[in-house]
Image (cartoon, helix red, strand yellow):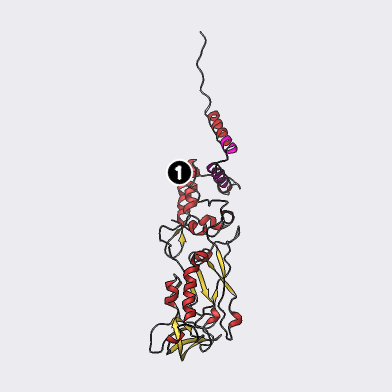
Amino acid sequence: MSDTTTNPPATSSIEDDLAQAIIGILETTNSPAIQRAREVIAHRLAISGDVAPSRVPAPRNITEIGGYINLLSEYGEVEQRSRLIAAALGIAGPQLSLPQPGALPPMSFVSREGARPAGPRQASFPLSYTIRSDFIPTFDNALEEVAMRGGAVPILTPARVLPAAGGQLPEAGTGQLHLIGRTLSIAPTAALRAVATDPLSLSRPTPGGGFEVLARVIDAAAPIAGTIADDDWTSWECDAAACSEIETTDARFVLTPILNAAGWHQAADPTNPINLADPGTWAGWRNITGLVPGVTRYAEELQLLYSADALVGSPVFEQLDYIWTGTGFAAA
């Protein structure tokens, strides 16, 4: 009697057939979901493949694997640790935060004409500044409030450019916020040089109190400039060697509550200036409106302003899953 028993196919043959079938689907189907799958696979190959021989011997047991895990934990490399464990288990690593390609970012940096009040410092004031498009309405209102009182605020915003491949990651906090358009600086030459003519000052009422950023009334014809009376002020004035307190009597108003109402707050409490090279912290401002500690991801903010191609090609890609802590974006 003939033997009709059929031997089951080898496991490797089944796996090969399954792999070929998946490859066939990826090659012949053009739906958005399949296109996205191709991108994820290509990215995994790019960052997870054996692109260079290992410089350390392969771990021989679970104890040595645990040593590598502990080392990555000690240095805070949470994502790399997850990838290590996934590689050891032979499974896919953590889900990638790939930005959607093709679409233009919903927001942008918009260039605005800068305020350049007349005076000895005018030549140093920037001709323009940039601001995130969603912050424009409230910031324009704030500057209009200042102008109605007869003041002016020269703004300085350095270029916001993603670090190139191989470049340094932005510093936690200020550097990260700068890239997503949440920082600005008042032009440093707008105050501390000559209190009588500078458009801004770091001052307090002469009887006492803390120093704040004030705007001097330089346009007496402004709509409500006449409502701001002269007062006695003590202000900082500096040169290259030192700073001193100067007393003046003129019309000034506090700038802080106007900018605060627009979402902009000083990055740090104003410190006393030492000299022009060390002017204190009065000029730096930030806007953290809508950033929720433990919830907001860095990817959400970056994707508002930068294309997928730009993010994938920059080292900030490794920080896309970072979470806002209240002071910066960090690994969860």
> Of 220 and 2, which appears nearest the observer?
220
> Of 167 and 187, which appears nearest the observer?
187
Q: Quadrant of the C terminus?
A: bottom left
Residue 296 colored magenta? no
Number of callouts in the render?
Answer: 1
Counting from the top left corner in percent of width and height, residue 309 is at 59, 54
Write down the residue under mark 1. Answer: 62
Residue 36 colored magenta? yes
Counting from the top left corner in percent of width and height, residue 87 is at 50, 44
Counting from the top left corner in percent of width and height, residue 155 is at 54, 75
Counting from the top left corner in percent of width and height, residue 163 is at 58, 61
Crowding at mark 1 (Cα within 10 Å: few <14, some 14-19, many 20+)? few
Relative to 267, does residue 217 appear above or below in the rendering? Answer: below
> Of 168 and 162, which appears nearest the observer?
162
Residue ranking furthest to the top = 1
Which secondary structure dominates the residues rendered in magenta? helix
> Of 15 and 32, which appears nearest the observer?
32
Q: Quadrant of residue 111?
A: bottom right
| Badge 1 amino acid | Ile
- Residue at (53% x, 81% y) in the render: 190
Relative to 237, does residue 125 appear above or below in the rendering? Answer: above
Is residue 326 shown to the viewer in this render? yes
Q: Secondary structure at mark 1?
A: helix
**Residues shaded magenta:** 24-45
Is residue 201 shown to the viewer in this render? no
